[in-house]
Image (tube, coloured by chain):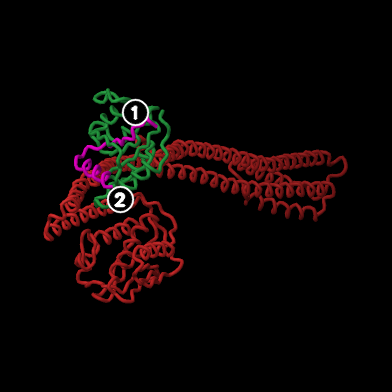
């Protein structure tokens, strides 16, 4: 378990949403370190320890929280690239997005998302959602052994 | 030449040939009749001549007066027969004249024979003269008989000849008719069956979707006209099909635009709202103790407004989805659906006492998902507007109007003034204050869209403070392709 740093990778381009998500984590008492990346390309750079994240070591995060609308490479593109690589093929990935369009939900699951959560406007509900997410994915859920 | 003219010509030729055959048969009939009469008459003449000969023999042998008398009678009969011939043609006239001459000659000679035969040697000269006379008479009579026989024979030959002529004319006529029929059949094949086969092929091709098929027929007859009209028709069809196709493409493009628009709405418009709500709450949580009541109230209002706008966006998207969704028709048990929705509503607000009166076995044919959305809106409405009534009753049922089934949802809640009924089904139209009954005003607009998608009519009847009844009339389902505003493909 040492190789896993228990970090959460938050892929989100909107500063407000980053701040609110981090606030929600804090208020849910989730102590895991959170790495924030701002676009799809950076997310893959981090996951595969290349580009700006070349020197960070290869340990994968415990959980990836992925927005769908992202600059450069969108969330579905990130997911596709992750599932195609053996290092991240089994990495738990939750799509957290504003969209509840049927086509997005279907595409997310089809590409191997483990969960699909819609960001509610009401922050109280959002808080609740993040709390449940954290408990489930970081405490309850058994993650696959590192590849 | 038109087919009609060709047909008239063929019929005329055919009738003409038949007329010729008929005339020749009538003529032959007359000919045969005359020849038979000639034959019969000739037989009578021959009989008379024979009698004459026998009477002459008798007289020459016995010289009795009775025989002379008889010769006179036979001669008169023969004369009558020869003077009034029946059915004789020109060729026989000569023979008849001969017979008349010979008869007269023989009768004349008969008159010269003495009543008493010559006897003894003294009358030797006389006897020789008589013998000569007798033989002359007999030879004349013999000749006459032969000629009469010839007349009988000629009549027979005439019959034969007429028959042969009739056979010839009939055969030629039949041959002409056969040729005509063959020619007509060939023309029919070339001018009618051929073009019809091409037309049939063309209709098959066009029916299969080959709009560019052209008959291109050069003939000027009726079928040529028809083929040209057919070509004109496929041209017109192809043009309107192309136009339809173009507008369909436009519609598809518009639909795509609408979809990407609603996608952006759902994504981009919601995130600022989330920020407004989230940071307002953060302010309240982190600095609430340093704010006065008014500031806290203001922050609450910001939050409420953000959340309300979030709901509005969601419902707008829902409305758009109702318009876009493809109809999947199936039998829907409206009663069971209403029961489910009712229990969900009751579960969400267990404190409320509402009597549900749902008729059993209401079946309609429609899209289950869309009907569920509409019914949910109607029942949630009824639930909401009966919230201030003590003994709330919500009924779901059917009645028959003009022979058709009409479904209704009625309640005994707040109702509304029918003066505003026309605004009832418009989006964001509300007939009550938000503070009395919360809502966005999209629900009934959604209901109406669902009904319109199905081709059903929808209406409402209400009075302020006396409840409201919403009814819809499930119509016979039309083919979805005829539905307006829903491009195929």
B203 or B300, which is in the foreground? B300
Subunit of mark 2?
A
Above or below B457: residue A54: above
Q: Quadrant of the N terminus of chain A?
A: top left
Q: Of callouts 2 and 1, which one flags the residue occurring earlier in the amino acid sequence?
A: 1
Secondary structure under the numbered disc 1 in the rendered image: loop
The boundaries of the magenta stretch are A1-27
Q: Is residue A84 found inside the magenta-colored segment of the image?
A: no
Residue density around tag 1, few if under 14, some if 14–19, many if 20 or more, within 10 Å: some
Instruction: Tell which of B194 and B484 is nearer to you.
Output: B484
Please provide percent x and percent y for residue B358. 41, 69
The residue positioned 72% from the left and 40% from the top of the image is B146
| Chain displayed in green | A
Chain shown in red: B
The disc at residue A128 is 2
Q: Quadrant of the C terminus of chain A?
A: top left
Q: Is residue B303 visible?
A: yes
Q: Is residue B272 left or right of residue B116?
A: left
The residue where tag 1 is placed is: A59
> Which residue occupies 29% across, 60% down?
B448
Secondary-structure class at tag 2: helix
Does the magenta run of residues contain A20?
Answer: yes
Q: Identify the chain of the residue marked 1, using the numbered disc in the image.
A: A
Q: Position of residue B162 (x, y in %)?
A: 61, 41
Classify residue B205 as left or right of residue B293. right
The part of the image, by quadrant, that contains residue B224 is top left
Furthest residue to the right? Answer: B120
Q: CA distance from mark 2 to mark 1?
A: 29 Å
């Amino acid at each position: 378990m040492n190789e896993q740093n228990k970090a959460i990778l938050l892929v989100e381009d909107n500063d407000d949403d980053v701040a609110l998500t981090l606030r929600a984590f804090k208020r849910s008492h989730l102590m895991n370190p959170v790495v924030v990346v701002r676009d799809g390309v950076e997310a893959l750079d981090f996951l595969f320890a290349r580009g700006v994240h070349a020197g960070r070591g290869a340990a994968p995060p415990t959980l990836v929280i992925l927005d769908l609308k992202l600059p450069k490479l969108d969330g579905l593109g990130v997911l596709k690239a992750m599932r195609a690589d053996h290092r991240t093929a089994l990495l738990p990935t939750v799509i957290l997005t504003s969209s509840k369009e049927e086509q997005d939900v279907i595409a997310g699951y089809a590409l191997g998302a483990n969960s699909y959560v819609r960001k509610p406007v009401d922050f109280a509900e959002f808080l609740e959602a993040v709390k449940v997410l954290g408990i489930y994915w970081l405490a309850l859920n058994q993650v696959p052994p590192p590849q | 030449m038109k087919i009609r003219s060709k047909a008239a010509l063929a019929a005329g030729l055919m009738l003409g040939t038949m007329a010729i055959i008929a005339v020749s048969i009538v003529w032959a009939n007359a000919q045969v009749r005359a020849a038979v009469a000639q034959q019969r008459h000739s037989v009578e003449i021959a009989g008379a001549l024979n009698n004459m000969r026998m009477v002459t023999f008798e007289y020459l042998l016995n010289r009795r007066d009775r025989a002379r008398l008889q010769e006179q009678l036979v001669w008169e009969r023969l004369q009558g027969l020869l003077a009034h011939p029946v059915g004789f043609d020109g060729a026989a006239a000569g023979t008849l004249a001969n017979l008349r001459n010979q008869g007269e000659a023989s009768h004349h000679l008969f008159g010269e024979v003495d009543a008493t035969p010559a006897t003894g040697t003294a009358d030797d000269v006389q006897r020789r003269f008589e013998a000569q006379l007798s033989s002359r008479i007999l030879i004349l009579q013999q000749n006459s008989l032969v000629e009469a026989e010839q007349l009988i024979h000629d009549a027979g030959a005439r019959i034969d000849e007429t028959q042969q002529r009739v056979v010839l004319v009939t055969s030629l006529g039949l041959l002409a008719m056969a040729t005509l029929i063959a020619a007509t059949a060939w023309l029919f094949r070339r001018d009618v069956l051929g073009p019809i086969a091409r037309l049939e092929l063309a209709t098959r091709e066009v029916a299969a979707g080959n709009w560019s098929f052209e008959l291109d027929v050069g003939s000027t007859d009726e079928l040529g006209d028809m083929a040209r009209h057919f070509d004109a028709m496929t041209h017109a069809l192809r043009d309107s099909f192309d136009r339809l196709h173009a507008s369909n493409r436009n519609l598809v493009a518009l639909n795509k635009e609408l979809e990407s628009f609603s996608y952006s709405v759902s994504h981009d418009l919601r995130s600022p709202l989330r920020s407004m709500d989230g940071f307002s709450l953060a302010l309240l949580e982190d600095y609430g103790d340093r704010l006065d009541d008014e500031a806290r109230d203001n922050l609450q209002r910001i939050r409420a407004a953000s959340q309300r706008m979030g709901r509005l966006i969601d419902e707008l998207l829902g409305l758009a989805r109702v318009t876009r969704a493809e109809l999947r028709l199936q039998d829907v048990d409206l009663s069971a659906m209403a029961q489910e929705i009712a229990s969900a509503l009751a579960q969400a607000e267990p404190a409320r006492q509402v009597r549900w009166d749902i008729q059993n076995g209401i079946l309609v044919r429609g899209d289950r998902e869309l009907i569920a959305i509409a019914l949910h809106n109607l029942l949630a409405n009824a639930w909401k507007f009966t919230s201030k009534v003590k003994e709330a009753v919500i009924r779901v049922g059917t009645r028959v109007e003009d022979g058709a089934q009409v479904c209704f949802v009625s309640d005994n809640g707040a109702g509304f003034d029918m003066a505003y009924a026309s605004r009832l089904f418009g989006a964001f139209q509300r007939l009550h204050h938000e503070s009395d009954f919360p809502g966005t005003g999209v629900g009934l607009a959604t209901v109406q869209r669902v009904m319109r998608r199905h081709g059903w009519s929808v209406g409402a009847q209400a009075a302020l403070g006396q409840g409201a009844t919403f009814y819809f009339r499930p119509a016979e389902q039309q083919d979805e392709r005829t539905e307006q505003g829903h491009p195929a493909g």
